[in-house]
Image (cartoon, rainbow, N blue to C red):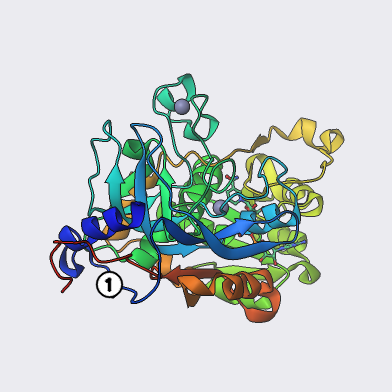
Amino acid sequence: MRSPRFAKTLEGIATEADTGMRIPERTQGRDVVGAMKAAVFQGPGRMSWQDVPDPEIKDPGDAVVRVDVVTICGTDLHILKGDVPETLPGTVLGHEAVGTVVETGRDVRSVRPGDRVLVSCVSPCGRCRFCRENRYGQCLGGGGWILGHTIDGTQAEYVRVPFADLSLHPLPSAVDSYDAVLLADIFPTSYEVGVLAGAVRPADTVVIVGAGPVGLAAIATARLYSPGRIIAVDLAPSRLAAARELGADATVTDDEGPEQLVADLTDGLGADVVMEAVGIPATFEMCTRMVRPAGRVANIGVHGKPVTLHLEDLWIKDITITTGLVDTFSTPMLLRMLAAGRLPAGRLITHRFELGQMEEAYDVFGRAAETGALKVALGGPQHTAVEVSGGPAAG
Ligand SMILES: NC(=O)c1ccc[n+]([C@@H]2O[C@H](COP(=O)([O-])OP(=O)(O)OC[C@H]3O[C@@H](n4cnc5c(N)ncnc54)[C@H](O)[C@@H]3O)[C@@H](O)[C@H]2O)c1
Ligand SMILES: [Zn+2]
Ligand SMILES: [Zn+2]
């Protein structure tokens, strides 16, 4: 009987004024006790928006969050393609959300029911060797990227979030949920694995290969370091238009000779920093050809195939190559930047849907080349569950 408890929490604590979110009207006449809708991975190529049991607190550090805004990540498409074998059929997808805490385990201290929170894509245990070094993505204590990967995720009406003290970030009222949701994954990813790992410095020439959501967020966060110029490379003119809007100084398609352009703009030397935000061998190899001697190549892309590292050319160039999974240690800082109006996060959202339109949203996101989708966002839960006997009437 979970849903009535959630309903009581939401009616008793969360109001429009204190969450900044629309609290939906009660669904009349629908039996929602103990059941919710969720995007369930059905094996390669198949996802369905279907009834599943409401999540429950399993560990004292857990919280249950009502999902108010959720997005779909390119990585969800990788899972659907069957590229992520550890994600088993039956798993609820999704690792990005903004929501409202409805229940907390007895050990949770930093959030309480009614709080509007960002659900991070990485859930750190906070205690293991790597968490103590802020390398949350490498968590050895049962955390890391688990939501929508090895446990049920956020593309649902409710989600259980482990290690809630570190995985949930209370949101200041000034921050819009549709901006904040992009800080669950793509902004910390591009900032940590691209900009910080690539050590972008003032006056640098920065090349970003791949102008999808991650590459675009890399443009926005690289600009925080006043690079001399940012050059964006992509196949799709629509994505390069978005890159220019977000602050790329020059854009070039693969057909237009990006390597020649970079050489021309740097007196033949190459770029100081090159970021790979695609995840295929051709673009990684292109990045290593565009970097200057002693420059940095920051690989962000998730690769499914082996890549050739041309050490016969590279050994003499003193270059640094970095790769990594996002840790999300930078999320609190990015949230402060967002609150200060310094991150154009929500501009990446091109399409909005109701939560119940999950299958349609996947279709639009999965055909991004035709639909022009960058990020799709789904908002609004489908139910606040049944009347609580004796509880206050919803306003
Ligand atoms: N390291 C991490 O922790 C982490 C986290 C999230 C995402 N990622 C990865 O980052 C990458 C980018 O994510 P995204 O959501 O922006 O993906 P996306 O698929 O939306 O964007 C990729 C972009 O690359 C472009 N592209 C494809 N082939 C190209 C080519 N040959 N030359 C130039 N551009 C080309 C596409 O047109 C597209 O705009 C993916 O591989 C994703 O899995 C990594
Ligand atoms: Zn993701
Ligand atoms: Zn850990």
Quadrant location of the C terminus?
bottom left
Q: Is residue 227 visible?
A: no
Residue plotted at (27% across, 72% down): 22
Q: Residue furthest bottom?
A: 371
Residue 323 vs 391, above or below: the answer is above
Which residue is more in the foreground, 164 or 66?
A: 66
Q: Residue at the location (16% across, 59% down)?
A: 12
Q: Percent x, y for residue 162?
A: 41, 38
Q: Nearer the viewer, residue 370 or 222?
A: 370
Q: Note whether 372 is above or below 199 in the view shown.
A: below
Q: Which residue is mark 1?
A: 22
22 over 142 or under it: above or below: below
Q: Quadrant of residue 321?
A: top right
Depth order, front residue of 5/112: 5
Horizontal side of residue 4 vs 309, given as left or right? left
Who's the residue at 19% across and 61% down the image?
Answer: 389
Residue 284 is situated, as x and y percent measured from the top left of the image, at: 75, 48
Give the x, y percent position of residue 209: 67, 58
x and y percent of residue 87 in the render? Answer: 66, 44
Q: Residue furthest top?
A: 129
Horizontal side of residue 382 vs 217, given as left or right: left
Q: In the image, 275: left or right of 85?
A: left
Q: Which quadrant would residue 257 be assigned to in this image?
A: bottom right
Q: Dot 1: few (<14), some (14–19), or many (≥20) neighbours within 10 Å? A: some
SS under mark 1: loop
Number of marks: 1
Instruction: Examine the rendering and report whether any part of residue 29 can be seen.
Output: yes
Q: Amino acid at mark 1?
A: Arg
For residue 255, which quarter of the picture?
A: bottom right
Question: Outermost residue, right direction?
Answer: 312
